[in-house]
Image (cartoon, helix red, strand yellow):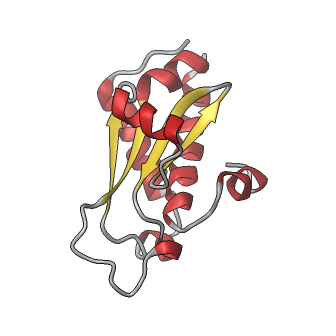
Amino acid sequence: MYETTDEEFEQAVEDALASIPPRFLDALENVGVTVADAPTAAQLASLRRGDAPSEGTRSGGILLGLYEGVPLTERGLYYGNVTPDVVTIFKQAHERIFSTREQVVEQIRKTVVHEIGHYFGLSDADLRRMGY
């Protein structure tokens, strides 16, 4: 277990976003990235129900991140006037699983890329094949 301050964790998420190639970052529209200590009961319930707008990154059954929204591949002609998609990265899960700062930072990067991948319509299987 490796504990970070909120500021260190948020900076690692910002650094992970900055590491994404500009062509992908520039394509992000109507999506926010946030940090939370742990998933809410509603977020966990949406995953258990299999609600379409939620896809999460897991390690050993522990939820590391979550994408909630409508992937680009599913946005039709009438897509608009909707709340922003949200990518949430869960701090306590990363700290619980990994024992060094380097491991936490690397997994944050993988989790951010994984969740952004869902925005572009990639499935969990696609992202696992890509190493995320």
Visible residue check, residue 38: yes
Say above or below: 34 vs 7.
below
* Residue farthest toward the right in the current orientation of the protein: 129
Residue at left offset 25%, top offset 67%: 82
Say above or below: 103 vs 28.
above
**Where's the N terminus, which quadrant?**
top right
Visible residue check, residue 40: no
Residue at left offset 67%, top offset 49%: 132
* Residue farthest toward the top in the current orientation of the protein: 1
**Residue 30 location, quadrant:** bottom left
Compared across the picture, whether 61 is left or right of 43 comes to right
Residue at left offset 54%, top offset 24%: 101
Say above or below: 131 vs 106.
below
Compared across the picture, whether 5 is left or right of 114 comes to left
* Residue farthest toward the left in the current orientation of the protein: 81
Compared across the picture, whether 83 is left or right of 103 comes to left
**Residue 75 location, quadrant:** bottom left
Q: Residue 130 or 56: which is nearer the viewer?
A: 56
Q: Position of residue 54 (x, y in %)?
A: 47, 49
Q: Position of residue 42 (x, y in %)?
A: 35, 33
Q: Where is residue 17 in the image (x, y as percent from the top left)?
A: 44, 54
